[in-house]
Image: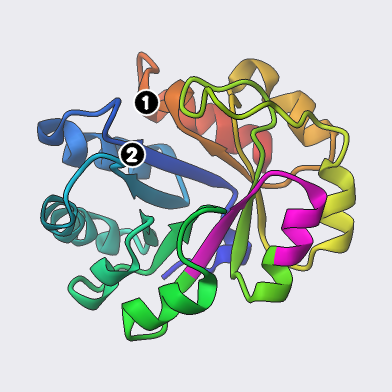
């Protein structure tokens, strides 16, 4: 599998945007466009449905050595050989997530401040999401944290850091100029006229 240190563009297949019947097609387009890391997120979906979707997705992502991460539910990793799980501030701890997975997996954590980023590193996260950088329809209740701490986080946190939240092609350069090397795209990528072309444009900018 592709190492986290090599990943630049992280795509999230959010089931509030993507119909179940379109999940495989979206994943294939992300891979074709050069997305390095894919997450399956289904906040209101059952574990059984997510297990089934993750199983199908993993067959696709494995062919391109693209790591597949599942949001929230580490126990899915005990059923499907996904590469990792992502947890939020109010979800399981890193330790509990690893225990639920019952095997060695990547565990990422959402952080919304410099202090939370440092705490996630101490907790043993393998990578962090840092944001929301801008306002985002995916997390409307979160106040944007802006760009001011991006360079500080990259300087003081020794983990792969993926900036997230409202990032799109139009503002990506400002995120890069602030010091970011890795970003997550959700709605901008999923709603693009061509996921393949949009992802390629982003990966070119992040190169």
Asked if 67 appears above or below 135 in the picture, the reply is below
Q: Position of residue 33 (x, y in %)?
A: 41, 37
Q: Is residue 109 magenta?
A: yes
The residue drawn where x is 43% and y is 79% is 98
Which quadrant of the structure image shows residue 76?
bottom left
**Quadrant location of the N terminus in the rendered image:** bottom left
The residue drawn where x is 44% and y is 41% is 11
Q: Position of residue 133 (x, y in %)?
A: 69, 31
Of 131 and 54, the residue lying toward us: 131
Q: Position of residue 66 (x, y in %)?
A: 38, 59
The residue drawn where x is 46% and y is 27% is 138
Residue 41 visible in this rendered orientation of the protein: yes
Which quadrant of the structure image shows residue 161?
bottom right
Asked if 206 appears above or below 103 in the picture, the reply is above
Residue 105 visible in this rendered orientation of the protein: no
Q: Are marks 1 and 2 in contact (CB under 8 Å)?
A: yes
Tell me the number on the disc at residue 13: 2
SS at mark 1 in the image? helix
Of 29 and 108, the residue lying toward us: 108
**Quadrant location of the C terminus in the rendered image:** top right
Q: CA distance from mark 1 to mark 2?
A: 7 Å
Tell me the number on the disc at residue 190: 1
The residue drawn where x is 43% and y is 24% is 187
Tell me the number on the disc at residue 124: none
Q: Which residues are magenta?
A: 107-119
């Amino acid at each position: 599998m592709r190492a986290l240190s090599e990943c630049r563009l992280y795509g999230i297949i959010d089931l509030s945007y993507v119909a179940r019947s379109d999940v495989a097609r979206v994943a294939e387009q992300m891979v074709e466009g050069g997305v390095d890391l894919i997450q399956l997120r289904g906040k209101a979906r059952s574990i059984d449905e997510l297990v089934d979707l993750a199983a199908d997705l993993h067959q696709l992502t494995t062919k391109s050595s693209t790591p597949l991460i599942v949001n929230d539910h580490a126990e899915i990793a005990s059923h499907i050989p996904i590469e990792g799980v992502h947890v939020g501030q109010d979800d399981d701890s890193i330790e509990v997530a690893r225990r639920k997975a019952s095997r060695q997996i990547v565990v990422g954590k959402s952080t919304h401040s410099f202090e939370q980023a440092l705490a996630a590193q101490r907790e043993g996260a393998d990578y962090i999401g840092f944001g929301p950088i801008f306002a985002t329809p995916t997390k409307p209740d979160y106040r944007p944290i802006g760009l001011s701490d991006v360079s500080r986080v990259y300087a003081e946190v020794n983990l792969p850091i993926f900036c997230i939240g409202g990032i799109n092609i139009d503002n990506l350069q400002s995120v890069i100029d602030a010091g970011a090397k890795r970003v997550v795209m959700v709605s901008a990528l999923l709603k693009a006229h061509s996921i393949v072309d949009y992802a390629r444009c982003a990966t070119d900018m992040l190169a």
